[in-house]
Amino acid sequence: MRFQEAYEGYQAKRLSQEEAAMLLGVCPRSFRRYMNRYEEEGLEGLLDRRLDRVSPHRAGVDEVMTLESLYRDRYMGWNVKHFYRWYCRDHGGGRRYSWVKNRLQGAGLVNKGRAVGAHRKRRLAAALPGMMLHQDGSTHEWVPGRMWDLIVTMDDATNEHYSMFFVDEEGTQSSFMGVGEVIESRGLFSSPYTDRGSHYWHTPQAGGKVDKANLTQFGEAMKALGIQMIAAYSPEARGRSERAFGTHQGRLPKELAAKGITDRDQANAYIKKHYLPAFNQEFSHPAREHGSAFMPWVGVDLNDLLCERYERTVGNDNCVKFEGLILQIPQDVHRYHYVKTRVTVLRHMDNTLSVFHGPRRLARYDLLGQIIDSKENREAA
């Protein structure tokens, strides 16, 4: 039916030979052969004559049984290549190697070999600084009796560590801190390369692919900054950062012990002032290309972007309930009240809170939910 449609279109000059052939998914030469057969024999001439014809090269049943008996009786356990050489030399075999192998495997006399995997190549480092940053955490006994998480943000192109500090536990806030330090010192980068930790990605099925449509708080912040996240699916994929952590675990505890440091704040101060500059001097290297992918950061306060965001509804008393705290919205000159208004609560990297109505900050609060006196609040009052 499709050929008739193409043929009639060609005869009526609605289609060229090339267009009619394209409609059938064949080349123009094949279309011309189809036309000749159709004009000579009709639709019957288009049938594939090979469908009901036995190949003249097909081996007979006797030949197949002889091959199987030969292998079973005299060469059982030989690998196919070894047997094939003797089959041709001593038994006058004239079949191809692939035919012999398929017959022996089909009879269950030889096991199928394991498929050869794809040839793997080492991934080249990024061409420019700022194109790809690794961020990861390492839990280790950095000082005797204390298990801290070391959070590192490093450049894939140069191995330079831009941010490095201890926290009690890796999470959203520590990830924001690392990214914030990089942006403040270097500028906006192109993409972070992270594991599939729950603060980076939602993973519907354990060990499966990440859900790029359902973003975490960290993912939403990266999206707002125009930064494209990349998920790593194995430790080997993060080989550069994993090797760096091996170096840190071997060196940093010894240096902290030599200095008698056991306090986390003192350890972070030592890293920033001494350990990190020395590490970068020894292990960082130039990028493959000249230039930089970092872009200067100009815009709103980073603290209002690198933060957790939660939607809330203001109560009848102009208060917002948030994780056991009562956040009182102060009176301002823009509205009489905010009752039943949808607002956004921001938890900043220093764990202070802010309440926003659209782009306007209504108030800022400390850890206990008390309003922090600021110019913004005084102007609003």
Image (tube, rainbow, N blue to C red):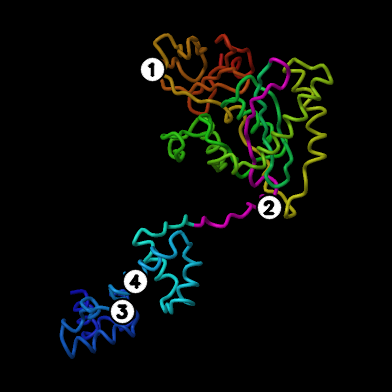
Dot 2 or dot 1, earlier in sequence: 2
Q: Left or right? Give the position of 69 relative to 125.
A: left
* Type of the residue with mark 4: Thr
Residue that carries the numbered disc 4 in the rendered image = 66
* Distance CA(mark 4)–CA(mark 2): 61 Å
Dot 3 or dot 4, earlier in sequence: 3
Of labels 4 and 1, the one closer to you: 4
The residue closer to the viewer here, 102 or 84, is 84
* Type of the residue with mark 3: Ala
Whether tag 4 and tag 2 are in contact, CB under 8 A, the answer is no
Dot 2 or dot 3, earlier in sequence: 3
Dot 4 or dot 1, earlier in sequence: 4
Residue that carries the numbered disc 2 in the rendered image = 127
* Type of the residue with mark 1: Lys
Instruction: Count all numbered tags in the image, as a single digit.
Output: 4
Q: In which quarter of the image is residue 303?
A: top right
Mark number, residue 340: 1
126 within the magenta span: yes
From this view, report whether residue 86 is shown above or below residue 234.
below
* Distance CA(mark 2)–CA(mark 3): 46 Å
**From which residue to which does the magenta span run?**
116-145
The residue under the point 39% across, 71% down is 99
The residue under the point 55% across, 21% down is 347
Dot 4 or dot 2, earlier in sequence: 4
